[in-house]
Image: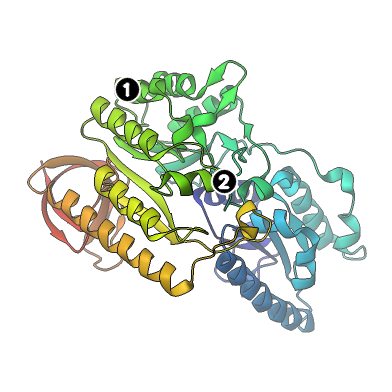
Amino acid sequence: MEPLSYYFETYGCQMNFAESSAFKATLKERRWREAETAEDALLVIINTCSVRETAERRIFGRLAHYAALKKKRARQGHPIFVLVCGCMASRLGDALSKHGADFVMKTQEAAIFSRLLAEIEDWTLDKTRPLHERFNDENDYKDFSFAPSHHEAGAFRAFVPIMSGCNNFCAYCIVPYVRGREICRPPAEISAEIKSLASRGVREITLLGQNVNSYAYNDVDFPSLLESIARETEGSPIKRVRFLSSHPKDLSARTIQVMKDHPVFCRHLHLCAQHGSNRVLAAMNRRYTRERFLELVDAVRTAMPEITLSTDILVGFPGETEEDFEQILTLMERARFLYAYMYHYNPREGTAAFDLPGRIAPDVKGARLKLVIDLQMRHTAELLRSRIGETETALVEAVSRKNGRELVCRTERDEMVVAEGEARLIGSFVKIRLEALSGNTLRGRFVE
Ligand code: SF4
């Protein structure tokens, strides 16, 4: 076992994956090694998700597993420490210690990570003073700050967090309670991180935030930030910029115009609809109507006819009638998303919707969700089939897990294409002719 070795588990959204990359960069700077298995590590870090109860149950399962491993390792005289961070750490705090966490680091406290590592490093040299005694000073908990880099060595795609937290309080969502209110990253920091990514040959970046459209730092709003990113990436290795997630209530005409004016912004937009009924949207506290959502869809498509849209759909919100549900289907028919993340509502303690009357029976929620999924599968297939015969530029991302001779590529419209090719192409842009559809995956052939 390496003296300073870690094992990482990340759950949840891309924000968590970006933060894990930042933690890994810090570990690497401090000469920690990534262990192949937790059995070989001194420190296990679990970056958690609280969005659904099932996600939290899974983490409790992992903690039970590590509690058993800790006992075994203690008997062998090789302790192992477990650090829990992310949203579940923010929500449950020290209560996680009862489940075997040695350290609990809330999302707002990520700045203490280096300090924690330093203490563990010291402890490996002098074990007379237990770790928990070294690390119980409340003053250590600084305010939230963004890590300087979220880049993993060699990666050609990177996430760049531009904000954290959310002010919206959608009735079903735990995020504002666990991640806190919106904090926007200074534009100069964002720009420095993007420049550093470009200097390391990164080809595609994704700007991240719970609601990127409400970005505001002094007089810099989201479209101004996009404009400066477009200027700064001109002529750099970064050829594609994406952003997630877009709240319809904050998507402005200026943002659409900036996307249209600068081809570096991918022709794909993830715009979270959640529902198609005005009554349910109001109960969810989404603060837009079905009509406004569809107006935005039209505005985006008028500006960029080739753009694809994706979305989130939540069925079975308390009080959802058959008529409400039908309106999800008609909204989907009208908007025609390339893909969607589709869920049925599950009560989440601590959110406004938890106490709402009119919970929908599980079999009804399940049946409605199935109808939504079937419709989306049909739309996905139709949209992808309509692309057959066209030639596209795609970024080669990986070797296919199903067939080692095939590569998985992504177009700027966020379509996945599989084609035969050599692994040396990973990380480069290729021209690809779209030839067939297999299930919901396009198959293609490299040209040139
Ligand atoms: S916009 Fe709504 S759903 Fe999205 S993170 Fe904020 S509260 Fe949650």
Q: Quadrant of the N terminus?
A: bottom right
Residue 235 seen anywhere in this rendered image of the structure: no
Which circle marks residue 101 in the picture? Answer: none
* Image spot of residue 72 (x, y percent): 73, 83
Locate the C terminus by quadrant: top left
User: Which residue lies most toward the top here?
Assistant: 219
Residue drawn at (36%, 70%), measured in percent from left and top?
Answer: 367
Given the image, on which type of amino acid does mark 2 rest? Cys
The quadrant of the picture showing ligand 1 is top right
Q: Position of residue 192 (x, y in %)?
A: 55, 26
The verdict on label 2 being within 8 Å of ligand 1 is yes
Residue furthest to the left in view is: 389
* Residue 402 location (% of width, % of height): 27, 68
Placement of 381 over or under 181, stated as above or below? below
* Secondary structure under the numbered disc 1 in the rendered image: loop
**Residue 337, above or below 257:** below
Foreground of the two, 225 or 395: 225
Residue 430 position by quadrant: top left
- Residue at the image position 72 percent from the left and 77 percent from the top: 67
Q: Is residue 194 left or right of residue 327?
A: right
Quarter occupied by residue 79? bottom right
Left/right of residue 423 with respect to residue 6 in the rendered view: left
Q: Position of residue 8 (x, y in %)?
A: 59, 61
* Residue 142, quarter of picture: top right
Residue at mark 1: 262
Relative side of 46 to 256, left or right: right
Indicate which label's residue lies in the foreground, 2 or 1.
2
Q: Amino acid at mark 1?
A: His
Question: Depth check: 437 or 231 in front?
Answer: 437
Label pair 2/1, CB-CB below 8 angstroms: no
Q: Which mark is residue 170?
A: 2
Query: Colour scheme in the image?
Result: rainbow
